[in-house]
Image: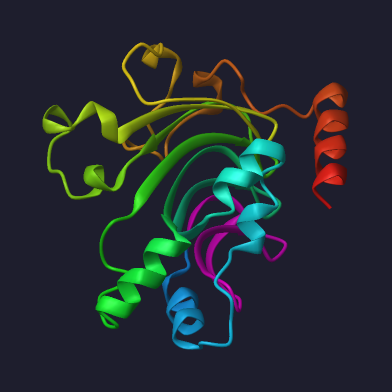
Amino acid sequence: MTKKEKITTKDWAYLGDVKNGKPHGFGKKNFYENLAEKILDKKVKLSDKEFNTSFCDSGLDYFSQYVRGSEEGHYREGKLHGLCKIEIKQIEIIQEEFKLNEEGFLSEGWSQLHAIFNRGIPNGNALLYGPEYSSMTSKDHLNPKSINYVSFYYGSLYSFVNDLEFDSSQVIDASNDLENFKLSQIENEPSTSDEVVKRLKEVEKKMR
């Protein structure tokens, strides 16, 4: 049985459904406080090791340049499992902004990754909104170049396009009613079949 609780670790604060002491169900993680402490401590190299474990190959090459500000979605036994929305920002940009403004370096310029995760690993089509989207009040005025259509294959970045030729009907935007989203609404619903579990274990082994 799940119940809403708050969990705080050295890396994040979580509020949402919990089972056996782990995020399980719908909830949100915040990383801002941890990021601020790390950037203020000049001896600590800014990175997001937990986030990196979600990717491999080209996916790891690309997303290891980022850290999370927040993460909202569906979890299973502590790992993202289903549709989620992750706020990310390039480490290099954070460091440069900190030099210019030590108080406001985490306030603006975040990108958003809307993706489907299977036991902590992204798989299938996804959306990566550029930072321009965060400050816009209407999608109608969004510059198309600020949307990237991304395709994952078990943590690896399979394709990355920033134009409108991509079949956007096959991508799910996590902006609307994320909490009540049903996994049955998507074709590549996270599965517990033996074949999928075997593939995920292979990817996890490769990531170590």
- 150 sits to left or right of 202: left
Residue 81 position within the rendered picture, expressed as x and y whole percent measured from the top left: 62, 40
Q: Main secondary structure of the magenta part?
A: strand
The span picked out in magenta is: 2-29
Q: Name which residue lies at 60% across and 47% down.
A: 75
Determine if the magenta segment contains residue 16: yes
Q: In the figure, residue 179 lies in which quadrant?
A: top left
Q: Name which residue lies at 80% across and 35% down.
A: 200
Q: Say how many tags the image has.
A: 0
Q: Name which residue lies at 25% across and 75% down.
A: 104
Determine if the magenta segment contains residue 167: no
Whether residue 56 appears in this view of the structure is: yes
- 98 sits to left or right of 208: left
Whether residue 1 appears in this view of the structure is: no
Residue 156 position within the rendered picture, expressed as x and y whole percent measured from the top left: 67, 33
75 or 114: nearer the viewer: 114
Color encoding of the figure: rainbow
Q: Name which residue lies at 43% across and 21% down.
A: 171
Q: In the figure, residue 190 lies in which quadrant?
A: top right
Q: In the figure, residue 195 lies in which quadrant?
A: top right
16 or 167: nearer the viewer: 167
Residue 112 position within the rendered picture, expressed as x and y whole percent measured from the top left: 38, 45
Residue 118 position within the rendered picture, expressed as x and y whole percent measured from the top left: 67, 35
User: Where 199 falls versus 54 (above or below)?
Assistant: above
